[in-house]
Amino acid sequence: MISLSKGGAWLINGREVIEAGEGTEALLQNKLGSKAISQEEAAKNTMAYRILEAHNTSGNMKKLQIKFDRMTSHDITFVGIIQTARASGLEKFPVPYVLTNCHNSLCAVGGTINEDDHMFGLSCAKKYGGVYVPPHQAVIHQYAREMLAGCGKMILGSDSHTRYGALGTMAVGEGGPELVKQLLNRTYDINMPGVIGVYLTGKPAKGVGPQDIALAIIGEVFANGYVNNKVMEFIGDGVANLSVDYRIGVDVMTTETTCLSSIWTTDIQVKDFYAMHGRPEEFAELNPGDVAYYDGMIYVDLSKIKPMIAMPFHPSNTYTIEELNANLEDILADVEKKALVSLDNNKINFTLRDKIRNGRLYVEQGVIAGCAGGGFENICDAADILRGKTIGADEFSLSVYPASQPVFMELVKNGAVADLMATGATIRTAFCGPCFGAGDVPANRGLSIRHSTRNFPNREGSKVTNGQIASVALMDARSIAATAANKGYLTAATDVDATFTKPKYFFDKTIYENRVYNGVGKADPSVEVKFGPGIVDWPKMSKLTDNIMLQVVSVIHDPVTTTDELIPSGETSSYRSNPLGLAEFTLSRKDPAYVGKAKSVRDVETARLGGACPMSDTGKLGEAFRVIKQEFPQLDAHEIEIGSVIYAVKPGDGSAREQAASCQRVLGGLANIAREYATKRYRSNLINWGMLPFILPEGELPFDNGDCIFVPGIIKAIKEKASVIPAYVVKDGIKEFELRLGELTDDEREIILQGCLINYYKSQLN
């Protein structure tokens, strides 16, 4: 079904793969003769390399400084981004910037918090020359596919699922500060990423959908980090056997592999897509060169993929539906055991085996939604499976969210909406809520199957500390429809007899022409930005001092910590434009004591800045200062910055949201300590908010929750690019241990020294 090369691989003429190893050089020489090229030169023949080269401004392909062609954000990120850019000297948007309203679409009951954010966005689109997509018109990524993507282009988005590789566009999802840099005509600075080939062969079986292919790949590559922070390049004969809608469905889920970006070969089907959407000039044929080298190869035989399910609580927790149904007791018991790690072991009585009814798995809810599930073909195929059937009048419910108004309107015209409604399903407007916990929240202990992007703990609305738990499993729309046809009993789409009508899609752009504000190239400085009471400026953040004292306020031993656990999604969305209000939710579902502890540390730092001596503090920090002073008598306690720090084994999997870092900073956080960081974007968010992304070498953890850590000479260490930074934990005296910062660009070093990105830009304006 899926296999991975053990090392690099050569692609010859787009068809033949030769894995690197003993005898490879002779084999290549025999095949290529005088056309043989070096590995270094062949690596330049990937599509990814060529696109990155065209957008790199550094002149050095090992150290990239990328300028993107276009950008996009949604309404729980664009307020903070624009506010940061405004504070840093923004005059107008330098590239087309699309502001969609698909996350905070549901305005607060009894208030106008979310709609205030929308009006802020519209006024900024007018003032700075952007595009404003009103609520319910399109989810961010569908609008980008329809109106923003272009072959050979690069798009930066403040959402982790910014993936348009199937349309020949290299897209990257990052935290807000990286978009701020682009708005201020700066660059996105990264080392040249590795490129992993994804070689597709065969044709999917009837009933197998794009989510099945994606989940099968994620299950093979997530845990081993095979594509972590690399670019996935989709090639092979199998690409032509997939419609563009199908390719998009696979592509959007590449985010869950933790790759940096993706790119696919393009063909006549992609050309037709751009022509249908009224943008034929955006098409260009993309293929690797005659001889291309990849850092690894994923082989996918599409014909052997079966309907898949990703069980709680991660998209990589994958099984075929067939094997799950055949081994329900054993697999559900194993899923429950794995879940204990995410649910703090025995704090809640979690079970899935109570879903077994008459030997079959019963689920209470089905959802087909968003950038992954809400595509035209997914919904049409689901309607074909359900036509003439009913979902029943029991617990099971089915909700369908078309990804955009043009898709919705075409589904109305071709009758798919009527067919679905006749079964008992409800049809909603374009909204990302089911993906991040703000829509279709299941009942306590409920199990929901969703064609959406994530099934992390808490994302579906659970509050474990309150004894509330629900679960989401990810599936393809076709198998969700098959399950709905069986009134909630888990069923693979390959097990039902359905005729897929495959109606043609007709895109009607007048919906957008009538409703979307397009101010590109029409910035009007006279427009006043509209603010609501829920839009609050960032608090002042101080420059780093040469010596710092950190107090550990949370220790998380989970193998991976998601951004949802660092700052919950869902009901917190209305606070996204209020840094102080949002910060109150930090780690609330993982470590409820965190906020209070972090504030106590921040209070000591606030007192220090006001002239008080930290050594007079009666708590652990005061005690630590007195111990440190004995060992370092020359220190002035008034000049030692105080901050909190969290430890997590591997934090940052999941969303690009900057708030996972900025909320810690608002509460006085100065650093994270980790064995490694799950994604590049989370580490970048820490840096851009002035936090030290420390790495702790393998070994016994030298500190406990509540301990104080003294790091002397941190400014000198940053400026001199020290590889090892001495630190001292205060515990029965002091004990030295080593921290590392990893590679930082010169700009990143200066951002940390200045205290945050806002300070960094202000220092350059002065």
Image (spheres, rainbow, N blue to C red):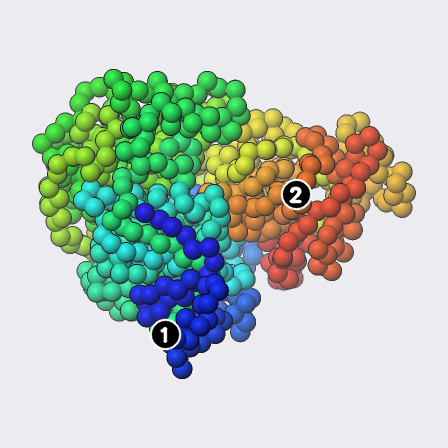
- Quadrant of res 662: top right
Describe the element under mark 1 as helix, strand or loop: helix
The percent position of residue 5, horizontal first and vertical second, equals 43, 55
* Residue occupying the far bottom of the picture: 34
For this view, does 527 lie left or right of residue 702? Answer: left
Q: Are marks 1 and 2 in contact (CB under 8 Å)?
A: no
Q: Which residue is pictured at 54% across the width and 61% down the height? A: 190
- As drawn, 463 above or below 496: above
The percent position of residue 45, horizontal first and vertical second, equals 41, 71
Query: Which residue is more in the foreground, 30 or 270?
Result: 30
- Quadrant of res 620: top right
Badge 2: few (under 14), some or many (20 or more) residues near its Cα, within 10 Å?
Answer: few
Asked if one can make out residue 717 in the rendered structure from this viewpoint, the answer is: yes
Q: Which residue is pictured at 77% across the width and 27% down the height? A: 619
Q: Which residue is pictured at 42% across the width and 28% down the height? A: 335
For marks 1 and 2, the one nearer the N-term is 1
Query: Which residue is more in the foreground, 469 or 49?
Result: 49
- Quadrant of res 392: top left
The percent position of residue 23, horizontal first and vertical second, equals 46, 67
Q: Amino acid at mark 2?
A: Glu
- As drawn, 120 above or below 32: above
- As drawn, 578 above or below 744: above
Q: Which mark is residue 31?
A: 1
From the viewer's perspective, is the residue at label 1 or at label 2 nearer?
A: 1
Q: Distance from label 1 to label 2 (Cα)?
A: 45 Å
For this view, does 684 lie left or right of residue 356? Answer: right
Badge 1: few (under 14), some or many (20 or more) residues near its Cα, within 10 Å?
Answer: few
Q: Amino acid at mark 1?
A: Lys
Q: Which mark is residue 698?
A: 2
Q: Quadrant of the C terminus?
A: bottom right
Asked if one can make out residue 574 in the rendered structure from this viewpoint, the answer is: no
Q: Which residue is pictured at 60% across the width and 38% down the height? A: 648
